[in-house]
Amino acid sequence: MVVTLSIWDMLARVGLAVLCGGLIGIDRGRKRRPAGFRTYMLVCVGAAMTMILSTYLAAMLTGAWAEAVPPAAANTDVSRFGAQVINGIGFLGAGTIIVTGRQQVKGMTTAAGLWASACMGLCIGAGFYIAALICCALMIIAIVVFSRLERMILSRSRNINLFVEFESLDDLSAVIEKIKSQETRIFDVELTKAKNSENHYPNAIFSLKLPKKKTHTAVLTAIAEIDSVRSIEEL
């Protein structure tokens, strides 16, 4: 029987998958995201094991099993196992993406991270360690470092969306007047109903464009000063 990988080589590959998947999952877990430390770790390990299996089958079909299998089976492309991992990870990614009652889409970064973690696991399982380590480092930078850069850029953006909850629909005009008093342009107003609110207060999502010298905090503070406003949040 032909042994394609030693036990130590397999342990090294699976161990690296645990380490890399866990490092990426730690940040998501701290932020209370749907997929965290264990999920990323399991996805990466599973993908690595799939590639180890593909390597094993490819060697066995052309080696120890060559005489026992028909010619058609010997020509089977066992790398398709890895392709199915990329397709199959979609059900996990779809489960992490949700649309909130405030029309926010959440979980996109988590879903993309799971997909990239699976790709990283395939590299580890194939023994392509350099690519896997580079991928792990870049993913950590994208998730941890670039998230801070993204928040900084968004905080300086002139276009913002605000979710405002008020006591009655009659208060909508007061909110609009307060926004206009801040020299802020209103692009769109979408009235919604707070389904999960105990008091069922009416609310609206405002799409605004701020003047150059006006900050997000200044606009939010001005609207919050209205007595009838129950809550306000930047989306």
Image: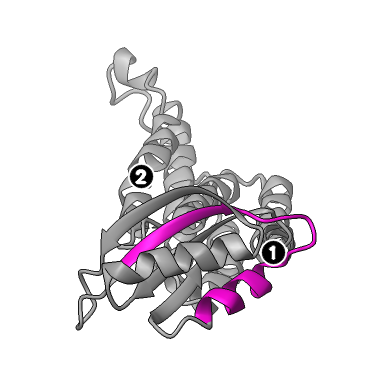
Residue at 43% over, 40% down: 86
Residue for badge 1:
155
Residue that lies at the very extreme toward the right in this rendered image: 213
Question: Which numbered circle lies on residue 40?
Answer: none
Residue 61 visible at all: yes
Q: Residue at x 36, y 73 (%)?
A: 165
Could you tell me residue 71's position as x and y percent? 33, 14
* Residue lying at 45% horizontally and 26% vertically, measured from the top left: 62
The front one of 228 and 217 is: 228
At mark 1, the secondary structure is helix
Q: Give the range drawn in magenta.
A: 203-224
Three-letter amino acid code at the position of disc 1 = Ser
Direction from residue 141 to residue 107 in the image, left or right? left
Is 101 on the left or on the right of 54, as rendered?
left
Sequence-wise first label, 1 or 2? 2
The tally of labels here is 2
The residue at the point 41 percent across, 36 percent down is: 57
Instruction: Give the quadrant of residue 64.
Output: top left
Measured as percent of width and height from the top left, residue 185 is found at: 60, 51
Q: Mark 2 points at which residue?
A: 90
Q: Which of marks 1 and 2 is in front?
A: 1
User: Label 2 amino acid?
Assistant: Gly
The verdict on residue 222 being magenta is yes
58 lies left or right of 209: left
Element class at badge 2 = helix
